[in-house]
Structure formats: C-alpha cells, structure tokens
Image (tube, helix red, strand yellow):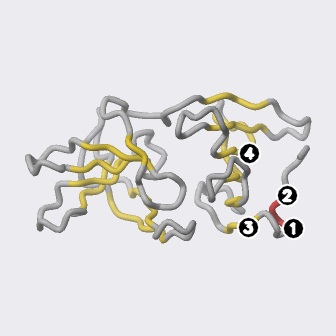
Amino acid sequence: MDPVIEYFFGPGDGSTTRWSSPADAVLGDSGPDAVSLDFDGDGRRDDAMWDTDADGIADVAALDTDDDGEPDAFYRDSGAGLWDRAADPAATGGEPGARSPAPGDGSGERALNLDLDADGATDIELVGAEKGGRLTAERLYVDADGDGVADTVLVDLNGDGVADAAYEKRDPRFMRRGR
C-alpha cells in the first residue's frame, strides 16, 4: 500500500482545508512520495503535492507549467495554504532559509525556529520533545499575518503529527513558555 500524504489549501486568510490522498507519483529518490493533481485544468494530472522529507505531509507543490509531463516550478506553502513561495527545484528536502535550534527552557521541551523566507526573522517555531533524535512538534507557533510576531498556534493533542486545534494569540490556550 502506498503511503498517504496530507496537504493543505486555503484562500490566504489563514484558514485551510486538509486533504489526504495515497501517494501515486515518484519525484524523489525512493518510492511514491507525491500525489498527482491537475492544478491548471488541462485535464492531465501532471502537477503534484510532494512530500520531500517523508513525514507524510506535502511540503512542495510541483507544477508542470510547460506541459512536458515533468514538474518545472516548485513552491512551498507560506502558511496560509497558498503554496506561493518559490522553492529551489534542486532541493529535495528541508525548508529554504536558515534553521537554528533554540535552547530549551528547562521544561524538557525543545524548540526549533524556522526562517522560511530567508529574511532573517523566525516565521514558525516548533515546540515539542525530542524523540529518536528528532524534534516531535506538539505546538507550532505561526506568524499568520506576516508581521514578525507569532499570532497562531497549531496544537497536536494526541501526538499523531496532525494538528488537532488552532488558537489565536488572544486565546488563553495560546501559551508560550518563557515569553
């Protein structure tokens, strides 16, 4: 059975809709890692949502803009479900921009700050526990309006890697330790 890949689309206002589909295309180095779609309405499923890091969640929209059957334009989601951040076509994993682990706060939690657009400012912050040498996010703080300040938190309540709830900054459940 092929892996299932989740992907999100939205109108740009921060709300998104989650989709899940079996991987049916190979864009990376090993096995099915993408979901074929028809973004341009030409009747051909020659575009794809690509899971470059094998975590079950698409992180690149791969588009065939010249209709030769091969993706030639790559985009990452800006956080609003729009897939409007151009990505390096040679990149097969990881986010563009700087990654820097943030120190823990003594609670046993770790954080990872990500600069998705390489402007020097943190765009999202993953907070969670390290499991098997990898940070497993329990809370994802997002700057949804692009003003440089996290204003939304996505929370994985059951540890399955899928956000179960989202809270805005004014909600008491937004909670940020040490802030």
Element at badge 3?
A: strand
68 or 134, which is in the foreground? 68
**Mark 2 Cα within 10 Å, few/some/many (few <14, many 20+)?**
some
Residue at image x 70%, y 29%?
101
The quarter in which the N terminus is drawn is bottom left
133 or 125, which is in the foreground? 125
- Which of the two discs, 4 and 2, labels the residue nearer the N terminus? 4
- Which of the two discs, 1 and 4, labels the residue nearer the N terminus? 4
How many marks can you see? Answer: 4
Element at badge 4?
A: strand
88 vs 72: above or below: above
157 or 92, which is in the foreground? 92
Q: Residue 51 carries which label?
A: none
138 vs 17: above or below: above
- Gap between marks 2 and 3 measured at Cα: 9 Å
- Gap between marks 4 and 2 measured at Cα: 11 Å
Q: Position of residue 144 (x, y in %)?
A: 62, 58
Residue at image x 39%, y 58%?
4
- Which of the two discs, 3 and 4, labels the residue nearer the N terminus? 4
Q: Mark 1 points at which residue?
A: 172
Whether residues under marks 1 and 2 lie with C-beta atoms below 8 angstroms apart, the answer is yes
**Mark 4 Cα within 10 Å, few/some/many (few <14, many 20+)?**
many
Residue type for callout 1: Pro
Whether residues under marks 2 and 3 lie with C-beta atoms below 8 angstroms apart, the answer is no
Outermost left residue: 68
Q: Where is residue 178 in the image (x, y as percent from the top left)?
A: 91, 44
Q: Position of residue 103 (x, y in %)?
A: 81, 30
52 vs 160: above or below: above
Q: Mark 2 points at which residue?
A: 175
